[in-house]
Amino acid sequence: MSSATDPWGRVDEEGTVYVKTADGERVVGSWQAGAPEEALAYFKRKFDSLATEIGLLEQRLKTTDLAPAQAASSIERLRESVVDAHAVGDLDGLVKRLDALTELSGKKREELKVQRDAARGAAKEVKERIVAEAERIATEETHWKNGGERLRQLVEEWKAAERIDRATETVLWKRLSTARNAFTKRRKAYFSSLEDQRSSAQGEKEALVAEAEAIANSTQWNDTAAAYRELMRRWKNAGRASREAEEELWGRFKTAQDTFFNARKAAFDERDAEFAGNAEIKEKLLVEAERILPVGNVRQARQSLRVIQQKWDEAGMVPRDSKERLEGRLRKIEDAVRQAEESEWRRSNPEAKARAEGTVAQLRTAIEKLEGELGKAQAAGNARKIKDAEDGLTARRAWLEEAERTLAEFS
């Protein structure tokens, strides 16, 4: 058998196949059938198969999220295959490529570690925020439905977040669970207290209903109306019973109240019908009273008004819807007469007239004095004194005008 050679191996005359490596030649197989070139081609195909597998691993490691542990396992397996390979080719080159892949896998591992650390740090912040909000709800929230729903959402957010280190995860989860339990206990305590309050309110309102029903047929209109107002005030301050009890008790309370006020209205309507004639009398008295205005003779006006007032009282009560209007018209006339009397008294008061005369005399004297001072200041050319005198005269002349009007009222 002849021999054959290749840059990476050879076949000797006996059919032994060798591969060349940095450490020298080593036997990779033997070939007894066929030409030596066929032997080299066969063992080159085995080399190509290894090279292809390494190329695929390079591609996966560079372009996919191949796990570093899986990559290391694949590199180690291929390295063992290359070292013991029964193939002809640049086996040292394949080893170098595997070394490069080992280095690349290490970098990927470090990058993944950094990413995982960052993700865990972010997850820790998320879970700390979740726990902080849960603890706030546990101690502050009083809208129980919203608070319970939000706690359920926080648990779902917790589950969706990345996991962190076990120790921190355990501590934070314990705080979250404690907050949820605290909220549940506080909510139960509130509703238990609320139930007690509702029970107390129900008892109090049952007593109020009994009082309301007891006076529903009373004909003491004013006193009973006041009693119902007091019962309503107490009802509002009593708090709320359960919905069913509240509706039933309020229905009874309102029925009693309506019974009384409807009866009172009917009685008042009947009475108002009887008082319609009284209102007609008072309408005529008002027409007579309004002739007094404007007041001329105060004494005569007072006498006429006194007669009308006596007739007014004798006329009796009027319907409720007329009372304020009629009495308002009479009050205007009474006020006008009283103001006329007061004005008359002021005009006839000798002491007031004497005071007004004295004021006028004092102001006239003061003006004469200031006029003299002004003349002297003008003669001397003293600008300051001129101004002071003019200002004083302006003020006192205004006062004098007002005082003279007051004095004129006494004439």
Image (cartoon, rainbow, N blue to C red):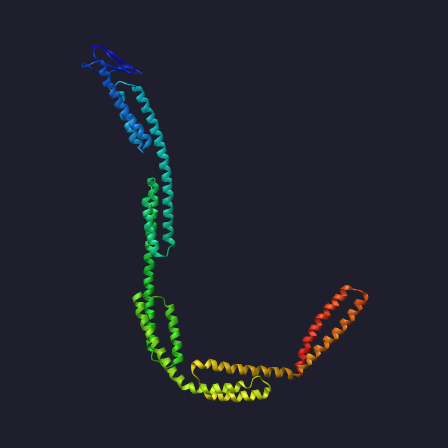
Indicate whether 110 appears above or below 29.
Answer: below
Q: Tell me where residue 259 sits by quadrant.
A: bottom left
Residue with the most extreme right position: 379
Which residue sits at x=72%, y=76%? 362
Viewed as shown, does residue 209 lie left or right of 17? Answer: right
Q: Tell me where residue 23 sits by quadrant.
A: top left
Indicate whether 287 appears above or below 403.
Answer: below
- In the rendered image, the quadrant that contains the N terminus is top left
Residue 312 in picture, x, y percent from top left: 48, 87
- In the rendered image, the quadrant that contains the C terminus is bottom right
> Relative to the observer, which residue lies in front, 266 or 45?
45
Residue 401 in picture, x, y percent from top left: 69, 75
Residue 334 in picture, x, y percent from top left: 54, 83
- The number of discs equals 0
Q: In the rendered image, is residue 272 in sight?
A: yes
Indicate whether 151 appears above or below 337.
Answer: above
Which residue sits at x=76%, y=74%? 368
Which residue sits at x=66%, y=78%? 406
> Relative to the observer, which residue lies in front, 205 or 248?
248
Residue 180 in picture, x, y percent from top left: 33, 51
Q: In the rendered image, is residue 79 in sight?
A: no
Q: Tell me where residue 373 sits by quadrant.
A: bottom right
Which residue sits at x=56%, y=82%? 336
Viewed as shown, does residue 254 lie left or right of 85? Answer: right
Residue with the most extreme left position: 33
> Relative to the observer, which residue lies in front, 338 or 36?
36
